[in-house]
């Protein structure tokens, strides 16, 4: 061969090599562009298998991915098989594909027609469920008349991502010169699949976070709803409980100032005791429903007045009322006593209004009240057992207030000298006889309240049948208008005469 022929042959070889490299680059480029268009694992696998058939004529192929525990390969996608077999599992070290996964090296099998029994044994081994803990719920696809098989590991920095497997009824699937190119394409696909898998894992985590956030939000909504419902229930219960306690006691309990346990103390208190004259007789003449309505109306009015003046309502005993000032809050002995007597005066005025109302409703015989008030040291607190407590007062002071009430004239307030000495500068009283009280060795001097002193003349509250008068000089803003109103009343009274 001359030099020209030799040079020409070398040039043809270089040209052929360049064409092959160009074709390989083009194949790599096309497959790379196609598989990187998507982040969906199945789409990437489908595109890869389709292009491999287009460029290399691989009519039967599959891609398997490594499981998270790295013990199995799961069929992701197949091409050309009647039975797609997606989801089938291959254990590491079992069959051609399993050995490639374990060794991470390309493996060829040829003349499989001579080794059919071997392949059958391999497939049977793949189907084992108990000994190898392999769940073969989906059958691994394969050609019955396969003559050759090639399995290529899909690697990223020597880390196995999956296996690309090709079967053929022909003896040789592809030339060895294509192995490098197919290996490159397999690894590119591995990279695309890994990115897609990471993306899907990220999306899964994001969905789980969103679901968890939504679940937490729903829990919060349900919790808020339950809290609202529970709060509403507690408010209703609290409202019901408040009817069993004086406002001061109720507030002290729920604010934590008053412990719910047996505990008492001795301190100066002003004790109020009232009773209705003729109520027992009235119970015999009235129907229970009417009597209940009348008593409820009376006690409600008296309770509102007690709360207004800051009294602690101890209890109702039928028509009798026990109230005390000085606990759980106090303004001082003098102010407590003045408030208690002022409350009593307002109660008598309110009872006068009720008598007018009851008379209109047919109650002929009027109800009259007697009131007794004493100031002295009493024992106050929670009395009872560990299971049931009663916030109340005991002592001679309570007994004395009760005796003062029974010795009072109707619609009058009888005071002990202890109370009188505290209120005498604010309220006018008339000295009465001394009384003997059981448990007290000396006679108790009494005083009857006649009204507010001259220092309190700016406040007048009177009620008689047909006339209700409330006069507070400190609150009148229009003197001229006030004079006209009073003058009109006087003129009408004179016309009556």
Image (spheres, helix red, strand yellow):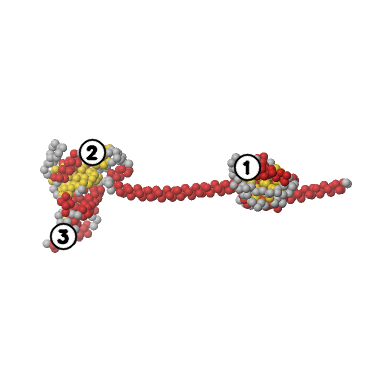
Q: Which residue is drawn at 30% across and 45% down?
A: 251
Furthest-top residue in this view: 441
Q: Which residue is drawn at 44% across and 48% down?
A: 220
In the structure shown, which secondary structural element does the residue marked by tag 3 occupy?
A: helix
Q: Where is residue 367 in the image (x, y as percent from the top left)?
A: 16, 52
**Label disc, if present, on residue 379 of the rendered structure:** 2
Residues at discs 1 and 3 in contact (Cβ within 8 Å): no
In the structure shown, which secondary structural element does the residue marked by tag 1 occupy?
A: strand
| C-alpha separation, residue under disc 1 versus residue under disc 3 | 114 Å
Q: Position of residue 289 (x, y in %)?
A: 22, 54
| C-alpha separation, residue under disc 1 versus residue under disc 2 | 87 Å
Mark 3 or 2: the one toward you: 2
Mark 1 or 2: the one toward you: 1
User: 5 or 417: nearer the eye?
Assistant: 5
Which residue does the numbered mark 3 point to in the structure image? 490
**Label disc, if present, on residue 91 of the rendered structure:** 1
Q: How crowded is mark 3: few (under 14 residues within 10 Å), some or many (20 or more)?
A: few
Does residue 340 appear in this view? no
User: 182 or 97: nearer the eye?
Assistant: 97
């Amino acid at each position: 061969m001359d030099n020209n022929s030799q040079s020409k042959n070398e040039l043809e070889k270089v040209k052929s090599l360049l064409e092959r490299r160009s074709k390989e680059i083009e194949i790599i480029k096309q497959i790379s562009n196609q598989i990187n268009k998507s982040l969906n694992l199945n789409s990437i696998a489908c595109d890869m298998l389709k292009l491999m058939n287009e460029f290399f004529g691989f009519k039967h192929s599959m891609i398997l991915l490594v499981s998270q525990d790295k013990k199995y390969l799961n069929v992701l996608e197949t091409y050309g098989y009647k039975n797609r077999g997606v989801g089938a599992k291959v254990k590491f070290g079992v069959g051609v594909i399993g050995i490639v996964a374990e060794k991470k090296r390309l493996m060829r099998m040829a003349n499989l027609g001579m080794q059919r029994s071997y392949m059958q044994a391999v497939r049977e081994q793949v189907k084992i469920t108990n000994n190898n803990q392999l769940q073969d719920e989906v059958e691994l696809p394969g050609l019955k008349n396969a003559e050759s098989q090639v399995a290529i590991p899909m690697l990223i920095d020597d880390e196995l991502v999956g296996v690309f497997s090709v079967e053929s009824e022909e003896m040789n699937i592809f030339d060895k010169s294509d192995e490098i190119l197919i290996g490159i394409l397999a690894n590119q696909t591995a990279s695309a699949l890994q990115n897609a898998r990471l993306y899907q894992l990220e999306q899964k985590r994001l969905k789980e976070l969103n679901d968890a956030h939504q679940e937490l939000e729903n829990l919060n909504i349900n919790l808020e709803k339950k809290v609202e419902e529970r709060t509403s229930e507690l408010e209703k219960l609290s409202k019901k409980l408040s009817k069993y306690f004086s406002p001061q006691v109720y507030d002290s309990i729920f604010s934590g100032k008053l412990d719910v346990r047996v505990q008492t103390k001795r301190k100066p208190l002003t004790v109020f005791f009232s009773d209705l004259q003729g109520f027992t007789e009235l119970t015999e003449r009235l129907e229970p429903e009417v009597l209940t309505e009348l008593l409820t109306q009376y006690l409600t009015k008296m309770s509102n007045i007690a709360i207004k003046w800051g009294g602690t309502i101890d209890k109702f005993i039928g028509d009798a009322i026990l109230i005390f000032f000085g606990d759980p809050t106090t303004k001082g002995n003098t102010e407590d006593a003045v408030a208690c007597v002022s409350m009593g005066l307002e109660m008598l005025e309110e009872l006068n209004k009720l008598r007018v109302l009851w008379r209109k409703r047919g109650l002929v015989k009027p109800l009259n009240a007697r009131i007794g008030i004493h100031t002295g040291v009493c024992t106050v607190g929670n009395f009872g057992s560990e299971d049931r407590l009663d916030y109340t007062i005991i002592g001679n002071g309570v007994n004395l207030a009760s005796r003062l009430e029974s010795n009072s004239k109707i619609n009058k307030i009888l005071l002990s000298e202890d109370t009188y000495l505290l209120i005498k500068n604010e309220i006018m009283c008339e000295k009465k006889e001394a009384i003997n009280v059981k448990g007290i060795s000396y006679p108790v001097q009494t005083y009857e309240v006649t009204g507010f002193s001259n220092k309190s003349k700016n406040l007048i509250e009177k009620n008689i049948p047909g006339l209700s008068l409330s006069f507070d000089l400190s609150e009148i803003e229009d003197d001229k208008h006030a004079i006209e109103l009073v003058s009109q009343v006087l003129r009408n009274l004179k016309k009556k005469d």
